[in-house]
Amino acid sequence: MKKKLIAVLLAAVTVMCTLASCGGGTDKGTVTLYVYNWGEYISDGSEGSLDTNKAFEDYCNGSEEIMALTGGKKVKVNYSTYASNEDLYAKLESKTVSYDVVIPSDYMISRLIKEGLLQKIDTSKMENYVNIDDKFKNLYFDTNNEYCVPYTYGTVGIIYDTKGVDAKDVEDQSWALMWNEKYEGNILQFNNPRDAFATAQFYQGNSVNSTDEQTWRSAAELLKKQKSVVQGYVMDEVFNKMKSGSALIAPYYAGDFLTMYEDNEDLAFYYPKEGTNVFVDAMCVPANAKSPELAAEYINFMLSEEIAIANAEAICYASPNKLVFENEDYKADMAEIHEDVMDILYGYNDENMEYFHDLPDDTRNLMNDLWEELKIDSGKGYVVYIVFAIVAAAVILLIIIFAIRKKRKALAY
Amino acid sequence: MKVLSRIYMFLVFGLLYAPIIVLVLFSFNRAGSFNNYSEFSFYWYKELFRDSTALDALKNSLILAVLSSVIATLIGTLAAYGISRMRNRYVKTVITSVTNIPMMNPDIVTGVSMMLLFAAAAAIPFLAVEMGFWTMLIAHTTFNLPYVVLSVLPKFKQMDKHLTEAALDLGCTPAKTFLKIELPFIMPGVVSGLMLGFTLSLDDFVISHFVSSSDFKTLPLYVYNQTAHEVKFSMYALCALMVFAILLLMILVNFVGSGGEKTKKKKKKTI
Amino acid sequence: MRKKTFLEKAAAVPHIVWIVMFIAAPLLFVIYFAFTDANGTFTFSNILNLSNYGEIFLRSVLFALVATAVCLLLGYPLAYCMSRLKPSTQKAVVLLLMLPMWISLLIRTYSLLALLDNGGLLNSLLDKFNLPAVKIVGTRGAVILGMVYDFLPYMVLPIYTSLSKLDIKYFEAAEDLGCSRIATVFKVALPLSKGGIISGITMVFVPSISTFYISQKLGGGRFDLIGDTIERQFLMNNNKNVGAAISLVMMILILISVAVMNRFGDDDGGEIIV
């Protein structure tokens, strides 16, 4: 009986395997381009949009120049995602994986350059590089435009649900909303130290790039205080939480607010008056990339008009590409999402906005240690659980002892 | 009392199944939300099949599960044969307890230790290990091994030693004896080890989480990646499909199984 | 004594090579990293600094204990009820119990989240009937609930296996001799299913104490367990040494407790069915 069963199972598995390998078989004549990007950060073809990676594959396989570059092999894009700059860094630093194109943020780019994990890109050979607005050239982390090509830029603000948050609590447009005890259990916080500390530092009026230990410690205190009102530490999980109304207040990126707003029109957004973080995410090629030439083609492709607009519309972040933000169709499409779209994305006042800079090693270590402390910290209401656990341990022990005693007795008879 | 126990069972099973049923039901919700059920549709299933990464992940999962369980079965069965013939008790205990480590250890420790090994190997220039298919295959084979050994070894112990000795005395070569006498006897153990390895490998997330790369993603890794970002309802469709597949498989196994039992009984009767 | 043939001598060799390379060597790496700093020099500081993580260890043990006890209290009666059913129904019910075990843990945990989240199905139903919303996600209770939900079948199945092996005559005899039904459970069933209880406890406790997905999703990352901490050290902080030290300590703790549990139930361990 068992043999028959196994035979059926194995047969089923073999059939499935062969079917699967017929379906999406990778023939030997392909070159794979490994792209590692933030989650929800590209037009991926869902719900009828343009599939960027597919378009790139088609473009490569139709272009004689690129075919010459790959020796006639077909190009396949392997696309995967990360949730924070630190995740990306850990992957690149371990050197057990190789990627061809990565899209880190400003401060992480300067760290990666410093540690020799990126290689130079020849932007002069990229015909679409002229599309980048001059404002986004020679930025502080790449003063000679040698290592990266800007993909998007944006700002952090506070997203809140107008159905659950009182209008008078958001009147003063402050970071204080994230510490408001009235919304206990409905507030979300970033799940990475750099962004989370920044919310506290802006609230306190300190620089996010401060090397003064005291400002970091006081920010950590503030975050610990916040822990009891926070529902969770999240990154991209914030989309589902805010869309479904599972949380009321979250700090996140302006572009992502627009994406959420498409599904939940009760949401609203503001830039805290104390100042906030502005960032540029740029495309880079890691030092151990296997196909840097193809990576350059990919970056160039991302800058072309149609692709750049499709991406900007899909992810709703501000684009440094002139062909995008000057395009009337793009403006019209975006205005359909939210009437203030151009103000939120492009028209903000950047007077008190600050870029993250790569921190010196000891400050970064301090930040990480303080973050660990925050994560370890157990907050209020712990005693109840100790009592619970003691009861639980007692129950388990009792049952075991009971079971064993009886057996011993039985043996004695 | 009987009614009470029925009610209790019904309640616990209800709780156990509620989330799964909700998930399956809402995978057919066109609105893609838990707050309103707009209409019954296969929209999210279509979206899922448009997503080639999900299908690739399924393919990878199956390939990995088949290969790792087969390799583990080959190595493990031979090992069980060797261990059962060992005379030094001390060596025997050492080998079996080392083999059992991945089974006793929490998965996360196994995953982390593998990751450290591969990271160290990556630093050796001529090896240039990269996370991907091979690291996954090694890791999965390793955690399948103890289950294979554990299910095959008792079979060797149950076996009558005189049988093999008789075969050897009658001029069978050791290899032939193994194939003709021992293998048929231990077969049930081998098969259950293989099946166990196959299902464990298919289901594993934690160990894979530490030794994988984007190059070779399995289904659990795909699901994890989906739940770490914005979850689209096509993910629920995928989960619902997996639930259906398992349900089908279990019904099939049970059906074929009970059918087999009946024929067995009949055979006994005729004898 | 007959001389060993070549096959007999060589059969275990590939296995031994494999386990040395991929079981023993990785563990040696864990030990190596636990006792060195980032530059590779020998140090005890990783282990000594683990006192910082005392709270995490304590919390994990607490949560895992509570989850195990709840599973035991919920699961034992269930297993008992199951074992007293008609054989044909039993088969179907066991199948019903095993189905969730086959479904990936990630899916089960996430579906629980989708059901319980503040904006999830449960609350939108409550809202429809004008009942107050319940906040579960992001609390300690949610993490424990997740553990219980995910691992309950692992408790029930071994207990059921050892109970179903018992001869029904034991129970009948006890009842004939004037034992009440409840007393029968305590005096007959419980001692005789000891092996199942022990292996059930181990099978719930070990995954509960080392989980990280459940606490991330249902606890919102507010209540980090040992698993979360290890994962963070390796995949985010890039601090292999501390991560290895925590892993080492957890491994030793678990191996000891498993060994102790196995001594309790060494005569007839409930088997694992998959």
Image (tube, coloured by chain):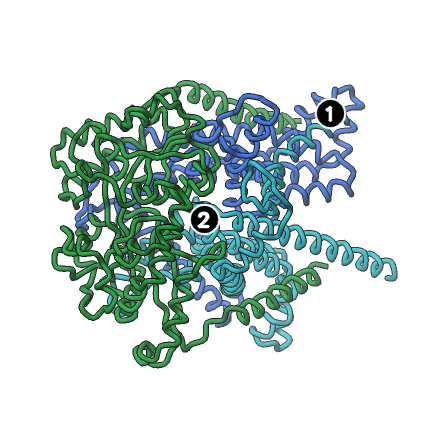
Chain colours: A green, B cyan, C blue
Secondary structure at badge 1 equals helix
On screen, residue C72 versus residue A307, left or right, reads: right
Residue at point 78%, 27% (across, down): C173
User: Neighbour class for label 1 at 10 Å: few (<14), some, many (≥20)?
Assistant: few
C131 or B146, nearer to the observer: C131
The chain letter for the residue carrying disc 2 is B
Residue at point 45%, 53% (across, down): B221
Image quadrant assignment for residue C224: top left
The chain letter for the residue carrying disc 1 is B
A394 lies above or below C159: above
- Sequence-wise first label, 2 or 1: 1
Taking the image as drawn, is residue A40 in sight?
A: no
C42 lies above or below A119: above
Residue at point 69%, 32% (across, down): B9
On screen, residue A22 versus residue B271, left or right, reads: left
The quadrant of the image that shows the C terminus of chain B is bottom right
Residue picked out by circle 1: B4
x, y (%) of residue B103?
A: 47, 48
C60 lies above or below A392: below
x, y (%) of residue B7?
A: 72, 28
Residue at the extreme right: B270
Residue picked out by circle 2: B224
Image quadrant assignment for residue A99: bottom left
Amino acid bearing label 1:
Leu
Image quadrant assignment for residue C182: top right
The quadrant of the image that shows the N terminus of chain B is top right
